[in-house]
Image (tube, rainbow, N blue to C red):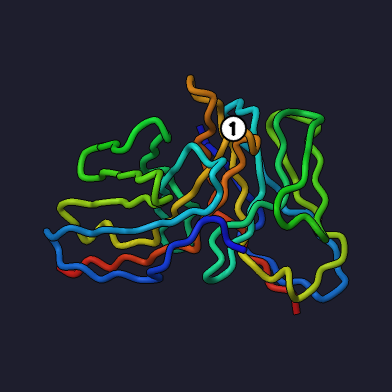
Amino acid sequence: DQQVKQNSPSLSVQEGRISILNCDYTNSMFDYFLWYKKYPAEGPTFLISISSIKDKNEDGRFTVFLNKSAKHLSLHIVPSQPGDSAVYFCAASGKAAGNKLTFGGGTRVLVKP
Amino acid sequence: NAGVTQTPKFQVLKTGQSMTLQCAQDMNHEYMSWYRQDPGMGLRLIHYSVGAGITDQGEVPNGYNVSRSTTEDFPLRLLSAAPSQTSVYFCASSYSTSGGRYEQYFGPGTRLTVT
């Protein structure tokens, strides 16, 4: 049973528009959430994170929103750029779980020029 | 800093063969881990280590062994390769942030095919 789910396997967006990636989790013990970006033939790279004590964290064009009651988080990319085309993984961890990361299945984003 | 390095980049094994995937980091990170990535499954944790001499199992440990004799190295051993172990393997290392969290740095991956 997947504890972290990304229900949209792919997303296509026009350059300059907003990309919204969604992630749902089931484990109430998760209290720290991260987004990773992955290009082909490379390892994932850390993008942005959010602690459960916050509901929003912003870093440049990237904003992560957390809705704890719905066990849902989203990543907004504004404006989207062609270089943002990649696979994005949502991940969750909890201190009670030894800080091990549990990943979602990923969403492939294509930004069209 | 080279970051996290993995060798080999590609490997083809026959069923039943054994091999070791190498992982090294030069950031003096205490925490290292191995993941496998399969289509639609994201990354699943195989084994991890919180420091030299300490290892523990992750979500999918069967068929794999690890050891951590130094801070820098964390090899992953496949004891008897099976086609189900065909995957892309990522090693990661991380440090503890001021909030006690781990943000992991990943290597470039090893693509393994078992025939």
Q: Which residue is drawn at 72% across and 36% down?
A: B49
Residue at x-position 48% and y-position 53%: A25
Give the chain of mark 1. A
Q: Quadrant of the C terminus of chain B?
A: bottom right
Horizontal and vertical percent position of residue A81: 19, 57
Of residue A59 and residue B14, the one placed in the foreground of this image is A59
- Above/below status of B83 relative to A30: below
Number of numbered discs visible in the structure rendering:
1
Rendered residue at 77%/46% (across/down): B57
Q: Which residue lies furthest to the bottom in this view?
A: B115
**Residue located 13% across and 60% down the image:** A17
Q: In this view, does A47 lie to the left or right of A14?
A: right
Single out the residue that lies furthest toward the left. Answer: A16
Task: Give the image location of residue B96, x and y in percent.
Answer: 55, 26
Disc 1, SS: helix
Please state if B25 lies on the left or on the right of A5 as rendered: right
In this view, which residue lies farthest toward the front?
A69
Residue position marked by numbered label 1 in the rendering: A95
Query: Mark 1 is on which residue type?
Result: Lys
Position of residue A62 relative to residue B109, above or below, is: above
Residue occupying the far top of the picture? B98
Instruction: Report whether A103 appears left or right of B77.
Output: left
Q: In which quarter of the image is residue B69?
A: top right
| Residue B31 coordinates in the image, percent (x, y) | 64, 33
Q: How crowded is mark 1: few (under 14 residues within 10 Å), some or many (20 or more)?
A: few
Viewer-closest of B53 and B44: B44
